[in-house]
Image (tube, rainbow, N blue to C red):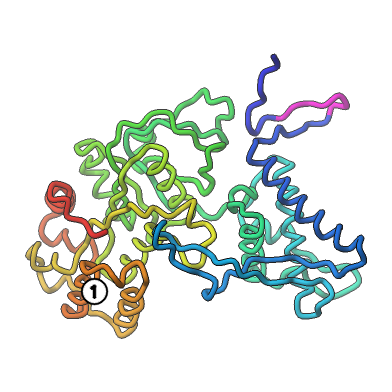
Amino acid sequence: MAKRKKAGKKSTSKNGDDKVALTREDKKTLTSLKGLADGVVSVANRSRAPHLEIPSRSLSNVRYNQSRKIIEMGSNRNRRELFNLSQAKSYMQTLLVGSGCKQLIESGKTTSIRGLYYMLKHTIDGTKEETFDDQGDCDPVIEDLEVTLDALREELHLYASNRGNLIGDLTLLDLVMDPDGNEPINCLTVGRNGFSIPSIVEPNSIKFLKCNAKFILHVEKDTVYNRFVEDRFFEKYQCLLTHGSGQPPRGVRRMLFRLHNELKLPVYCLLDNDPWGYYIYSVIKQGSINLAFESRRMAIPAAKYMGLRSKDYERCELNSSVTIKLSDSDKKRIGQIARYPWFEKKKMWQREFKQMLSNDFKLEVESLINRDLSYVTEEYVPQRLTDRDFLD
């Protein structure tokens, strides 16, 4: 029996041309792309106006699934027609992005969303019209294509910026850099910053081999991450430590999702005691409203909020000088978050919001340094773990 070709490998055809060996996921995505194009051709062959049916990504088409505990898209769709003057440009842009992604997949290459923009940007022959006026003209079309094809952006061979690291006793294969899987990477031995989480972390690019961790501690910022690394927290408590430089990018969220679901690791979030920290937790747990169509592959309903909490000002005996007064926009944002369906019926969260408003200040995780440089790693988090003191 012939050996199966490795993902990303190239084979040589009889005429000597290199041919990319497509993965199963690549073949599936290509089939979807070709199906989209075939649908357009089929309609045109019947002398009917070519059109696309694009799922609506408007807020009115987003709902919270109580049973699954994630944000999902509804069933509303928008019709995008070629012979409608107000829709013709977006129609052609959608097909152009699809064609560009097909080219990337067939060549076995990836590019950034910025790279795709430049790859497709040109002046249409015989006109002064540009295919895209700017990057903001292209990004929504990429998201439209994702939801239409039910494909992750990464499956279209597109990636965003890398902003996040992971350290701990996890051994994995980076099949992009090592297609044959001969060089396992242990995330304890790749430098003090750990493993840089790439934008594309799908199973055909990142494969988990062995993990000796008991849970994942996700912190908001690299500054807090560095304190945990320097204090060797991941060794003392046998965990994986991650950060996403604030709002975690898709690669970090997808990595957390895979680690949680495939390796059955609990996820605990250590975030700032402010509306932004609450929102980050909401996105990790329930999914993003803007990316509701990807929640089932990114949201982690079982994730727990470890802190910081509004009561920690007194509980940790912090100095008033480390507090940050709430702005009017902070107060407004707290009110909005408190009304999210996944928060509004949870008494503990409502008490949290009320206490923050009563305090009239917010706290960053770094404020714990006021007690001691290693207070967060040696006292705060260990105590929360012992007491199982989390918000859900």
Left or right: 308, with 32 as reference point: left
Residue found 67% across the figure and 25% down from its top:
5
Residue lying farthest front? 67
Residue 370, image x, y percentages? 13, 62
Left or right: 271, with 108 as reference point: left
Q: Is residue 23 above or below residue 104?
A: above
Residue lying farthest top? 1
Residue 371, image x, y percentages? 10, 59
Mark 1 = which residue? 353
Query: From which residue to which does the magenta span run?
Result: 10-16
Say what amino acid the circle numbered 1 marks. Answer: Phe
Residue found 49% across the figure and 46% down from its top:
198
Image quarter (top left, top right, bottom left or bottom right) of the N terminus: top right
Residue 159, image x, y percentages? 58, 52
Badge 1 element: helix
Q: How many marks?
A: 1
Residue found 45% across the figure and 63% down from its top:
71
- Write down the quadrant of residue 12 in the picture: top right
Image quarter (top left, top right, bottom left or bottom right) of the C terminus: bottom left
Residue lying farthest bottom? 328
